[in-house]
Structure formats: structure tokens, C-alpha cells
Image (cartoon, rainbow, N blue to C red):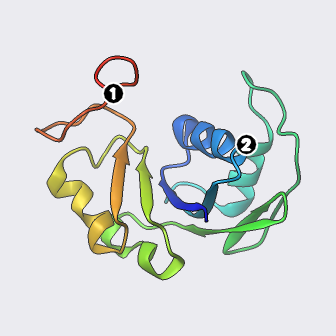
Amino acid sequence: MSIKIGINGFGRIGRLVFRAGLTRPDVEFVGINDPGMTPDYMAYMLRYDTIHGRFNGTIEYDENSITVNGHKVMVYAKMNPSEIPWGEIGAEYVVESTGLFLTKEKAQGHIDAGAKKVIMSSPSKDDTPMFVCSVNL
């Protein structure tokens, strides 16, 4: 059984999380939200990375999704996390990589939309616990 993940923000961090997750058989990406990107631009940015090189796999897209190595991932362009249908697509965890929703109150929108947990890729701006591997985890 795989862990179903959604990504909010498909910039540098979101794309690196996606690439890293593709190497694991126990991870399945079910959705990506980024109001500043169209599916064709997401595919382009995932395919070409100036540091990590060209993506070694297949990437296709249509108006509502990108398909990576044969696996379809739904794409959304919502500004408000509570409008992203995480529950409908089965996202258990959401990686918050926009840098915008870094308090419990703001990240709650992902939970309200159906996610079970939110992983912030930046330091929180309130008392949300931070975990750093090899430091406190």
C-alpha cells in the first residue's frame, strides 16, 4: 500500500519532492496545486532542471493533469488550500511548498479539503512543531 501525497506549490522544492518520491515504490503522487503554472509548464519544468539534469522518464500532459512514467497526477490552480480537492483524490499527506501557508491556521485549509497531515517545507511561523532529521528526529 502506498502513501498518497499531494503537493501545494510546484516550484523548486515541490519539484524536488516529486522527483525524490518517484524513486520510492511506497509513494504515490495524486495531485499538484500551483496557481501560477499550467500543466504544460509543469511538465517542462519537471523535465528540465539546471542542477539535477534532464528527467529520465516519460512526461505527458493534458489540460487537467500530468502523466509521469505512466502515472496520472491531477493538476489544480487554486489560491485557497481549502478549495483543492485533496479528499476527492485521496491525498493523505500534503507537502506545503509555497512558503505561504506556514501557520496551523493557514495550513488548516488543506485538512479542511480532506488531507490528513500537512508537511511544511519551510519553518513554521507559529508554534507548529518542526522536525529536522538527525537533529530532533
Q: Which residue is mark 2?
A: 23
Q: Position of residue 75 (x, y in %)?
A: 60, 67
Q: In the rendered view, tell whether residue 1 sits above or below residue 55.
A: below
Bin the neighbour count of mark 1 within 10 Å (Cα to Cα): few under 14, some 14-19, many 20 and up: few
Q: Which mark is residue 72?
A: none
Q: Amino acid at mark 2?
A: Thr
Name the residue: 84% across, 65% down. 70
Most extreme residue toward the left is 127
Instruction: Please indicate whether residue 111 sits to the left or right of residue 45 in the image.
Output: left
Q: Quadrant of the N terminus?
A: bottom right
Which structural element holds mark 2? Answer: loop
Q: Is residue 43 visible?
A: yes
Q: Residues within 10 Å of mark 2 (few under 14, many from 20)?
A: few
Report if residue 80 is visible in the image.
Answer: no
Q: Position of residue 2 (x, y in %)?
A: 60, 62
Dot 1 falls on a residue whose secondary structure is: loop
Quadrant for the C terminus, please: top left
Front tag of 2 and 1: 1
Q: Please, which residue is most extreme toward the top here?
A: 135
Residue 3, position as x, y percentages in the image: 54, 59
Up-down relation of residue 124 to residue 118 (above or below): above
Badge 1 amino acid: Leu
Marked residue nearer the N-terminal end (2 or 1): 2
Q: Residue at x 32, y 17 (%)?
A: 135
Residue, x 32% and y 64% (percent of image)?
Answer: 110
Query: x%, y% of residue 115?
Result: 37, 67
Please name whichever residue, 43 or 137, is drawn nearer the observer in this view of the structure. Answer: 137
Q: Foreground: 38 or 83?
A: 83
- Residue hosting label 1: 137
